[in-house]
Image (spheres, rainbow, N blue to C red):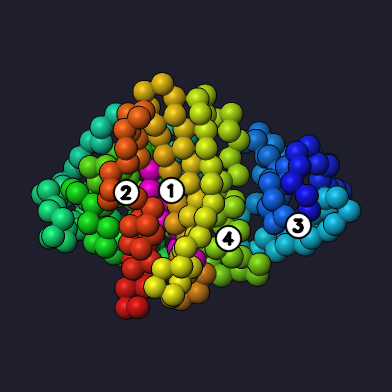
Amino acid sequence: MDPSAGVPVKLQFDGRAPAEVLGTIADGQLLLVPAPDESHLIDTFRRSSRIAVTAQERSFSLSLAATSGVLSELATCVRNSIALETSPPTPPPAAAAATLPQASPSTPPQIAGSLVARDVREFEEIKLAQNFLLAARLPNARLIDTGKPPALASFTAVWRSDDAAGAVKIISPGRDMTGASIASDLISVDPKLCKGNFGAARSSEVVDGAVVFRAALSCVEGEDDRTAQYFVTPRERGGFVVFAIIGNNAAGESTPNRLKPDLLGRAALQAATPGG
């Protein structure tokens, strides 16, 4: 497909009557279809098992069997990250998570905290979050149960550090589910949610023989520079793991070295494959 805007797109979910929308062909492999919060398309998407897409006389069929619950939470995370709170983090009560001493670059932090997992998956997500913080060596890193940023309120495995906050989510294996498709979904956000300068990008990198996909969003409004990064890595048991990192700097400030994409991507892969 040729890159273009305002392209008529026909969406058909599970044999229902097709919906006509306008999409944007970003490149030969990426079709963007806006779906605002109030749109019925989002609810239909989450409740369907398959979607047929027709654009510029070309048709595609995709399975949605494993997307509904996880993408719902991730979509909320992405939307809310555009309006990330700017106040400094408040340390949670000691019963929920203990604040760590300042971690030196040469000393790995001891990740403290007690989170309650409701099932095996949440237990694995908490372990993955611990692994990530150990690999990333973020200062004063801690798991939290209270005082979560609004963007991460629905997640269990949530953490804070001096520079950022984040969470971990597991995505089960599914037909047509790929790291690239997950990253593409994460950057499909309405730019009007940001009142200033908005940016979104998707990329991939080979790290230690495995491909790590990255979705990144930024919003600069006045003195605030809000960012969200999502690293999608393979999961040892099948499927994928999404590591979300959100931060807030004064406009014009450089990103701390420890939050650079290459370092965070490597930490995400090490967390997902600790024995690799």
Q: Is residue 36 above or below residue 43?
A: above
Q: Is residue 43 left or right of residue 275?
A: right
2 vs 3, front mark: 2
State if disc 3 and disc 1 touch (CB < 8 Å): no
Q: Amino acid at mark 3?
A: Ile
Dot 3 falls on a residue whose secondary structure is strand
Taking the image as drawn, is residue 140 in sight? Answer: yes
State if disc 4 and disc 3 touch (CB < 8 Å): no
1 vs 2, front mark: 2
Residue found at x 46% / y 37%: 218
The magenta segment: 240-246
Q: Is residue 167 left or right of residue 17?
A: left
Pick whichever, 47 or 139, lies toward us: 139
Give the main secondary structure, helix, strand or loop, of the magenta stretch. Answer: strand
Circle nearer the N terminus (1, 3) = 3
- Spatial CA span between label 1 and label 3: 28 Å
Residue found at x 19% / y 49%: 139
Circle nearer the N terminus (1, 2) = 1
Task: For label 2, count other residues whose C-alpha is less than 10 Å away and answer few (under 14), some (14-19) or many (20+).
Answer: some
- Spatial CA span between label 1 and label 2: 10 Å
Task: For label 4, count other residues whose C-alpha is less than 10 Å away and answer few (under 14), some (14-19) or many (20+).
Answer: some
Circle nearer the N terminus (2, 4) = 4
- Spatial CA span between label 3 and label 4: 18 Å
